[in-house]
Image (cartoon, rainbow, N blue to C red):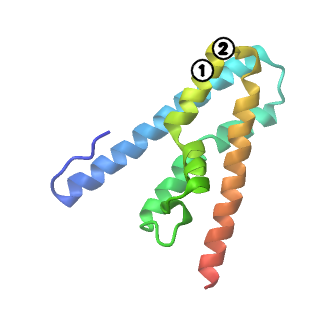
Amino acid sequence: MVRSPGPPVRQACSVRVDVLVDFFVHVVVICALATVLTQRADLPVALLVACAVLWPLNLFIGALAKQDGHAEHSFTKRGGTIAVIKMARDTGFILFVMGSWLLVHPQTIVFPVVAVCAFNACFLLASIGREAYLSMR
């Protein structure tokens, strides 16, 4: 969504609306993927719950990073490896990959879903480590 120009209160509200809409998109995608996964594969409930919890993690960590102004955040830098990591975290890219995968081979959708969730789990651990390190400096 476009953030509205104007007084700081209006800007803050439009940012909140943007984050809430992004979260809503994540909820809809999680529900759709969980529906497809339960129809296509006999998966443990714990795996479905883990995927549902880890899926919107990028949004949450991104909101935290924006709150602290990206102070010393490694993902604000540019570079080859960082660009690949940023792309793997991009919601649009993830939705494109999931949609394409569902179109081409819906029976194996579990593989990219687990890959996204594993990536998000690693990103969560790296973010916890980064925050712990910065809090001890």
Residue 22: numbered disc: none
Contact? badges 2 and 1 (CB < 8 Å): yes
Residue 74 vs residue 10, the one in the foreground: 74
Disc 1 residue type (three-letter): Ser
Residue 129 point in image, percent of width and height: 69, 68
Residue 94 point in image, percent of width and height: 57, 34
Q: Quadrant of residue 134?
A: bottom right
| Left or right of residue 8: residue 19 | right
Disc 2 residue type (three-letter): Val
Q: Residues within 10 Å of mark 1 (few under 14, many from 20)?
A: few
Tell me if residue 111 comes above or below residue 133 in the rendering. Answer: above
Tell me the residue that label 2 is attached to: 104
SS label for mark 1: helix
Residue at the spot 71% in from the left edge and 59% down from the top edge: 125
Residue 88 point in image, percent of width and height: 60, 43
Tell me the residue that label 1 is attached to: 100
CA gap, disc 2 and disc 1: 6 Å
Question: Which quadrant of the rendered structure holds the C terminus?
Answer: bottom right
Residue at the spot 16% in from the left edge and 57% down from the top edge: 7
Q: Residues within 10 Å of mark 2 (few under 14, many from 20)?
A: few
Question: Which quadrant of the rendered structure holds the N terminus?
Answer: top left
| Left or right of residue 44: residue 120 | left
Residue at the spot 68% in from the left edge and 39% down from the top edge: 116
Residue 107 point in image, percent of width and height: 75, 15
